[in-house]
Amino acid sequence: MASLSLPSVPVEGGLSRYFREVWAFPILEKEEEYMLARRWHEHGDSDAAHRLVTSHLRLVAKIAMNYRGYGLPVADLVSEGSIGLMKAVKKFDPERGFRLSTYAMWWIRASITEYVLKSWSMVKLGTVAAQKKLFFSLRRTKSRLNIIDSGDLKPEQLTQLADALNVSETEINDMNRRLMARDASLNAPLSVDDEGMEFQDTLVDDNPSPEATAATGQELSYRRELLQDAMSGLSERERDIVSERRLSEDPLTLEVLGKRYGISRERVRQLEARAFEKLQTAMTAASTEEPA
């Protein structure tokens, strides 16, 4: 996967050319996507993986453009999103029934948000979900309320933002100050005497980074919430069939479920397909919402 040849993202300028190049890749039909995913999943076909990735680069570009307000190069955002896309393709299971775009969307966002957070101080920002949510929603809300970034917020602005985001004024004020104060670069030299030695060279930690752990946990939690919400729209029988056929570690056969409900194996299969289609529709609709 790492050896895939993708359009190079320009370091500075030239993004228009990159976007034209990305939009030139055709969107895959459902069946074609399924077959390519099977080829990659079962045989490690790198050509199939390449087509899956390139056909979704436009999705990466669209999502990356939503994070332009954090003062980071768009090219870097696109590059990080592409890494998330490749991770999604690597883990994508076509037998689940969802389109790759639905699955990849969260990997792309997770990769970009992790990069944005790493560009600020994770020590100051913290790693809990509420703080990360406030980090990304505060700037957007300030823009919506026409509050200009110009240092500390006025008392009336604090009250306005606290009401809009349903958090305390203290949390708003602390997060705003963190957003206004950028950290020193990890590439800063230690001293004049230590030629070529940078501050990051002194940092050693073999454990998963806090932001990666938090991002992974938040992503899994959100996907479970999406599934639970979608399941609530099914009938009791449909929920039972989907749970036993798709969510159980030891799935029941169509014959066993048929005997349970006094119907044929074919009828169970039809009910399963209909219920799964309902889940897909509900979760796809929810996944198109803006990130909180």
Image: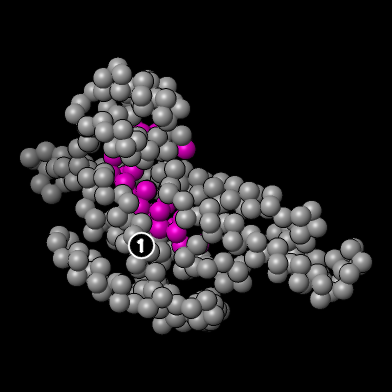
Residue at the extreme top: 155
Structural crowding at the residue carrying mark 1, measured as other residues with C-alpha within 10 Å and reported as few (<14), some (14–19) or many (≥20): many
Q: Position of residue 62 (x, y in %)?
A: 34, 60
- Residue kind at label 1, given as amino acid type: Val
Q: Which corner quadrant of the image does residue 292 belong to?
A: top left
For residue 266: magenta?
no
Q: Which residue is mark 1?
A: 60
Judge by depth and name the residue closer to the eye, 186 or 180.
Answer: 180
Image: 50 above or below 252: below
Report whether residue 46 is seen.
no
Residue drawn at x 41%, y 82% is 47
Kindly state the secondary structure of the residue where label 1 is placed: helix
Q: Position of residue 272 (x, y in %)?
A: 74, 67
Judge by depth and name the residue closer to the eye, 99 or 187.
Answer: 99
Q: Position of residue 199 (x, y in %)?
A: 21, 41
Residue at the extreme left: 192
Residue drawn at x 85%, y 66% is 257
Question: Magenta segment range?
Answer: 103-129
Residue at the extreme front: 145
Image: 213 above or below 34: above
Judged by its main secondary structure, the magenta piece is helix
Q: Position of residue 267 (x, y in %)?
A: 82, 72
For residue 120: magenta?
yes
Q: Quadrant of the N terminus?
A: bottom left
Image: 49 above or below 162: below
Residue drawn at x 54%, y 80% is 31
Image: 248 above or below 70: below
Q: Which corner quadrant of the image does residue 266 belong to?
A: bottom right
